[in-house]
Amino acid sequence: MMAQTGQVHSFDVLIVGGGPVGLSLGIALARFAPGMRVGLLDRRKLAVPKDSRASAIAAGVRHLFEAIGVWDGMAEGANPIAEMKITDSGTGDISRPVFLDFSGHRGPGEPFAHMVPNTASAASLIAAAQELVTIIEPGAVSAFTTGAAGGEVVLEDGRTLSARLVVAADGGKSMLRELVGIRTLSHDYRQSGLVTTISHAQPHHDVAYEHFRPAGPFASLPLSGNRSSLVWTETPETAQALLAMAPEDLAHRIEAAMGSVLGSVEIVETVQSFPLSLVLAHRLAAPRLALVGDAAHVIHPLAGQGLNLGLRDVAVLAEVLVDAARLGEDFGSMAVLERYERRRRTDTALMAFATDGLNRLFSNDVAPVRAVRDFGLSLVNRIDPLKDAFITQAAGASGAKLLKGIAP
C-alpha cells in the first residue's frame, strides 16, 4: 500500500527506515495488532539489493521470521552454520591451531545460525510489508515535533506524517535520534571492514572460521555451494591498499590469511569497505519516539551480531506495543516505552561491550597477551557447559516471545 501525497498522513505507529529492522517491525505490528495503522517511511524506494552478500541470522531471529511469515522466502538460499572454529595467529605465523570449536546446533536439526543472502531476506520482507503496511517512499525527514497525543515528522518535500508513536530505524547516523537530542557513546576503532563473497576449491562443510589476527578478526561464513561470505578487519591504510590490488592478487592474500583451509580462492563479488565504530545511544526512548537497530546501537562486526541485536529490539518492542494495545494503553507513552527500554538495555550493553572487549583483546600482537588469551580459549573449549552458554547467547532465542517463534 502506498501513501498518496497530501496534507497530513496519520498513523498509530510510523517507522522511519526501510531496512530489515524497520520492515520486520512493521510486519510484526500489522500481523499481531489487528487494526493498528502502521506506516513505513524510507529515504529511497524499497528495492532488493543487487549484490550477493549475506547476513548471519541467529536461531532466535529465524524464529521471529517464521512467526511473522517471511522465513519461507529466505530458507531456500540459506546455509546453516553447523560449526565455528576460532583460531589466533600473530604476524608471520604459518600454523593456526584451533583454540575454540563450537558445534553450531542448539538441538537436533537446529543450527544456532544460518547465512541468508541479503537478496532473499530483502525480497521476502519487502513483499510482506507491501501487503500489510502503508509505504511512504522516498521521503527524507527534516523535522520532528511531539505533543501530548503523538509526534509529527515533517519531510523535506513539505509533507507531514503524524503518529502516536514514531520508531527510529534510520541507521547509525539517525536523523531522528539527533533531532530529539539523544546523546551517544561512540568510539572510532581505527579499523576498516572489508566485505565480499568468495568461492573456494574445498567445501566448507557448513563451518564458519573466525581468525583473530593482529589487525583485527578475519571471518569466513559458509554460503551455499563452495562459497563463503568474508568479513576482514584491517587498518584503514591496509584496507585501502588491499582495495587497490588486482583481484587475483587479493585472492592470494585472502587464501594466505585463511591459512589455505579452503584451498584456492576466487573473489566473486566487488569488495566493499566501511569504517568500524562503536555507537551506543544513552537512551532507547524519548517522548513519542523509540530507537531500534543501528539507531540505538552500532557494534563491532566480529561476532556477526549487529543485525541480530537490532532484530531482538524488534521482538521486544513488538511484544510491548501489542500488549499495550490489547490493554487499551497509550502505546506511545513514556510509561510503555520505558518497558521496552528496560528490557533491551542490558542485552544491548553486554553485547556492545563484549564485542568491544574481544576486539581490543585480540587486535594486538603482544606475546604475553596472546599467551593468556589462547590459554583462556583452550580452557573454554574443554568446559562444555560454558561452551553451551556461549552458543545459547549467540542463538539469541530468549528474552521475547517472537524469538521463540511464539506470537506476542
Image (cartoon, rainbow, N blue to C red):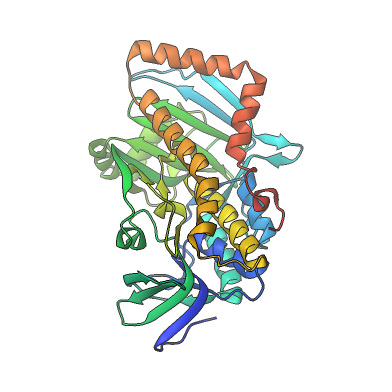
Q: Is residue 90 left or right of residue 381?
A: left
Residue displayed at 31% across by 82% down: 158
In the picture as drawn, the residue positioned furthest to the bottom comes out as 6
Residue 288 in the figure: left or right of residue 130: left
Where residue 402 appears, as percent x and y from the top left, is 66, 53
In the displayed orientation, state which residue is furthest to the right.
108
| Residue 182 locus on image (x, y percent) | 34, 54
> Which residue is rendered at x = 40% and y = 72% of the image?
147
- Look at the image and tell me in which quarter the C terminus lies: bottom right
Q: Residue 9: x percent and y percent?
A: 45, 82
Residue visible at 28% across and 42% down in the picture: 245
Q: Is residue 261 above or below residue 302?
A: above
On screen, residue 170 above or below 251:
below
Question: Could you say which quadrant of the image residue 120 lies in?
Answer: bottom right
Query: From this viewpoint, which residue is outermost toward the left?
Result: 237
Q: Position of residue 30 (x, y in %)?
A: 62, 70
Q: Can residue 123 be seen by looking at this rendering? A: no
Q: Quadrant of the N terminus?
A: bottom right
Q: How many marks?
A: 0
Nearest the camera: 265 or 140?
Answer: 140
Q: Between 254 and 38, which is closer to the camera in this rendering?
A: 38
Can residue 308 be spotted in the picture?
A: yes
In the image, 100: left or right of 299? right
Of 336 and 54, the residue lying toward us: 336
Task: Tell me the residue at 55%/67% (across/down).
Answer: 330
Above/below status of 55 relative to 331: above
